[in-house]
Amino acid sequence: MPKRKSATSYAQQSVGIRLSSHEKVCAERMEALQEAISDLNKEVKSLRQDVSKGKGAVAVLVFLGTLFVGVLGVLNFKWNTS
Protein backbone atom coordinates (compact mmCIF):
# COMPACT_ATOMS: atom_id res chain seq x y z
CA MET A 1 0.00 0.00 0.00
CA PRO A 2 1.47 3.38 -1.04
CA LYS A 3 2.16 5.87 1.65
CA ARG A 4 -0.45 8.61 1.84
CA LYS A 5 0.64 12.20 2.02
CA SER A 6 -0.64 14.05 5.00
CA ALA A 7 -2.90 17.08 4.77
CA THR A 8 -0.08 19.27 6.03
CA SER A 9 2.13 18.40 3.06
CA TYR A 10 -0.65 19.47 0.66
CA ALA A 11 -1.06 22.69 2.60
CA GLN A 12 2.68 23.31 2.47
CA GLN A 13 2.72 22.75 -1.31
CA SER A 14 -0.18 25.12 -1.88
CA VAL A 15 1.45 27.74 0.34
CA GLY A 16 4.68 27.34 -1.62
CA ILE A 17 2.83 27.82 -4.91
CA ARG A 18 1.02 30.87 -3.59
CA LEU A 19 4.26 32.37 -2.29
CA SER A 20 6.07 31.87 -5.58
CA SER A 21 3.23 33.50 -7.54
CA HIS A 22 3.12 36.33 -5.01
CA GLU A 23 6.87 36.85 -5.35
CA LYS A 24 6.49 36.95 -9.14
CA VAL A 25 3.78 39.62 -8.89
CA CYS A 26 5.87 41.64 -6.43
CA ALA A 27 8.92 41.41 -8.71
CA GLU A 28 6.86 42.77 -11.62
CA ARG A 29 5.59 45.62 -9.45
CA MET A 30 9.09 46.47 -8.27
CA GLU A 31 10.35 46.52 -11.85
CA ALA A 32 7.53 48.85 -12.86
CA LEU A 33 8.29 51.12 -9.89
CA GLN A 34 11.98 51.24 -10.76
CA GLU A 35 11.17 52.21 -14.35
CA ALA A 36 8.79 54.93 -13.16
CA ILE A 37 11.39 56.30 -10.75
CA SER A 38 14.07 56.41 -13.44
CA ASP A 39 11.65 58.23 -15.77
CA LEU A 40 10.89 60.74 -13.02
CA ASN A 41 14.61 61.28 -12.42
CA LYS A 42 15.13 62.03 -16.12
CA GLU A 43 12.19 64.44 -16.08
CA VAL A 44 13.50 66.24 -12.98
CA LYS A 45 16.93 66.66 -14.60
CA SER A 46 15.28 68.10 -17.70
CA LEU A 47 13.21 70.52 -15.61
CA ARG A 48 16.30 71.63 -13.69
CA GLN A 49 18.05 72.43 -16.97
CA ASP A 50 15.04 74.41 -18.18
CA VAL A 51 14.90 76.39 -14.93
CA SER A 52 18.62 77.11 -15.11
CA LYS A 53 18.21 78.40 -18.66
CA GLY A 54 15.32 80.57 -17.52
CA LYS A 55 17.35 81.99 -14.66
CA GLY A 56 20.17 82.82 -17.08
CA ALA A 57 17.77 84.52 -19.46
CA VAL A 58 16.28 86.61 -16.65
CA ALA A 59 19.76 87.63 -15.50
CA VAL A 60 20.66 88.74 -19.04
CA LEU A 61 17.42 90.72 -19.37
CA VAL A 62 17.98 92.43 -16.01
CA PHE A 63 21.52 93.33 -17.05
CA LEU A 64 20.36 94.74 -20.40
CA GLY A 65 17.54 96.67 -18.70
CA THR A 66 19.96 98.15 -16.17
CA LEU A 67 22.34 99.13 -18.95
CA PHE A 68 19.50 100.72 -20.95
CA VAL A 69 18.16 102.66 -17.97
CA GLY A 70 21.69 103.81 -17.14
CA VAL A 71 22.21 105.15 -20.67
CA LEU A 72 18.82 106.90 -20.56
CA GLY A 73 19.70 108.42 -17.19
CA VAL A 74 23.01 109.78 -18.52
CA LEU A 75 21.31 111.22 -21.59
CA ASN A 76 18.57 112.86 -19.48
CA PHE A 77 21.20 114.30 -17.17
CA LYS A 78 23.10 115.76 -20.15
CA TRP A 79 19.90 117.25 -21.68
CA ASN A 80 18.80 118.77 -18.37
CA THR A 81 22.17 120.45 -17.69
CA SER A 82 22.50 122.07 -21.11
Image (spheres, rainbow, N blue to C red):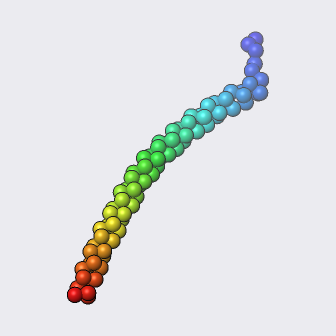
Is 19 displayed left or right of 30 in the figure?
Answer: right
Residue at position x 42%, y 54% from top? Answer: 48
> Which quadrant is the C terminus positioned in?
bottom left
- The front one of 56 and 10 is 56
Q: Looking at the picture, how far across and down is residue 41, in whole percent?
A: 46, 47
Q: Looking at the picture, how far across and down is residue 68, in whole percent?
A: 27, 73
Res 66 seen here: yes
- Quadrant position of residue 80: bottom left
User: What count of labels does the image hold?
Assistant: 0
Q: Looking at the picture, how far across and down is residue 2, in whole percent?
A: 73, 13
- The front one of 61 and 7 is 61
* Above or below: residue 31 compared with residue 74: above
Residue at position x 72%, y 28% from top? Answer: 12
Residue at position x 36%, y 63% from top? Answer: 59
- The front one of 36 and 1 is 36
* Above or below: residue 77 compared with residue 12: below
Is 6 displayed left or right of 23 in the figure?
Answer: right
* Above or below: residue 76 compared with residue 36: below
- Quadrant position of residue 24: top right
Res 54 seen here: no
Is 63 displayed left or right of 39 in the figure?
Answer: left
Q: Residue furthest front?
A: 82
- The front one of 67 and 48 is 67
> Which quadrant is the N terminus positioned in?
top right
Residue at position x 69%, y 32% from top? Answer: 15
* Above or below: residue 28 compared with residue 66: above
